[in-house]
Amino acid sequence: MLGGLAVETDDLESLTPEESEALDWVISLQEEGENQTIRQKFNIWLHAAEENARAWAKISRIYGAIGETKPAFEDTWCPVLNKAVSPMSVGQIVSRRIVRRRRLYRVTALAASVAVGWLVVGSDVRLFLQADQMTGVGQLRTVSLPDGSTVTLAPRSAIAFTSDAQSHTVRLLQGEAWFDVRYSAKQPFHVVAHDLDVMDVGTKFDVQEAERETEVSVESGAVRVTSFNPPAISEDIVAGQTVAISADHLVRRGNADPTMIAGWRDGVLTVQNRTISDVVEAIRPWHRGLLILRGGRFGTRRVTGVYDLQHPEAVIKALADTYGIKITRISPWLMILSDS
């Protein structure tokens, strides 16, 4: 979902070999579309196999959803695809598209009626229904909770809040949030994020639910971090300490300048010895569009620096200039970063 445009990002993150080739052709045609040799090579590839035609149709539709009024290069893939599939399967494809569009229109009307900044589709519908508070692209929001605590949500984040006689609990459903908690021994304050339970003992702290790991950073006071799943941990971390558990159950402990924790509240990203992939991941919630990393060499390079989140494209350009990253802009909504 891209700042008001519906795109299923899983489609771009788990490409088949043919779809990966199709994406490469989108880039080539965007850069050298007038080159007849490129056009001829593309047509040979497109007609070489039914799988190529299907892959081209899928990537073209995604490109169209991101930045065009109709699927990109539709004139190149429609004739080939129509020959490659039976009339019945074509009808089924069209029928599914109509159903999906009708569903999309209903969801759009629902989102507009409650003034939500996101267009919620697919899995975002579940998030929308679960969340008590959400933020959109580049949006921050500070929420006062019934117990007197406050939560500041980073862009593209969502939380749900529950309270009873025993405790107050915030579930971080997506993204990142900073907590300033009013301590109560009778009703402990918990933050649940993925496999972690963070119990406050009077503090200010940050919790980030990233794609590859969940991280807790303490600005002041202390929290007790407990893991629901292996590796089993239950430990207190204090101001200036961080702990993170990755998707493959690895624990990473570290230290951070307390004054720099949750710097995103001021539009600042501070990284120390993190990968370029980590930096891009942190930029995504601030960028109105889809960022795709192609190739693995540059993404694993480690960087240290301070970046302005209010100008994400300037950050991307600075990284590209410094580390030799190639930027390919397919549309205003799609940018591909690759090895130069």
Image (cartoon, rainbow, N blue to C red):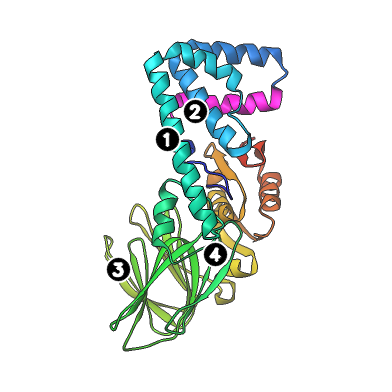
Residues under labels 4 and 3: Cα distance? Answer: 27 Å
* Between discs 2 and 1, the one toward the N terminus: 2
Secondary structure found at label 1: helix
Q: Amino acid type of disc 3?
A: Ile
Please state which of residues 79 and 87 is positioned toward the viewer in this rendering: 87
Q: Position of residue 2 (x, y in %)?
A: 56, 47
Residue 286 visible (yes or no): yes
Q: Mark 1 to mark 4: distance in Å?
A: 34 Å
The image quadrant of residue 215 is: bottom left
* Nearer to us: label 3 or label 1: 1
When asked about the image quadrant of residue 31, the answer is: top right
**Badge 2 or badge 3: first in the primary sequence:** 2
Q: Which element carries disc 3, helix, strand or loop? A: loop
Q: Nearer the viewer, mark 4 or mark 3?
A: 4
The residue under the point 64% across, 69% down is: 266
Any part of residue 337 in sight: no
Identified at 47% across, 48% down, the residue is 107
Label 3 environment density (alpha carbons within 10 Å; few <14, some 14–19, many ≥20): some
Q: Which mark is residue 233?
A: 3
Q: Mark 4 sits on what residue?
A: 154
Q: Which residue is mark 2?
A: 58
- Mark earlier in primary sequence (3, 1): 1
Number of dots carrying numbers: 4
Discs 2, 1 touching: Cβ within 8 Å? no
- Circles 2 and 3: CB atoms closer than 8 Å: no
Check if residue 191 falls in the magenta segment. Answer: no
- State which quarter of the image contains the C terminus: top right
Which of disc 3 and disc 4 is earlier in sequence? 4
Residue span colored magenta: 16-32
Which of the two marks, 2 or 3, is nearer to us in this view?
2
Please name the amino acid that badge 2 sits on: Lys
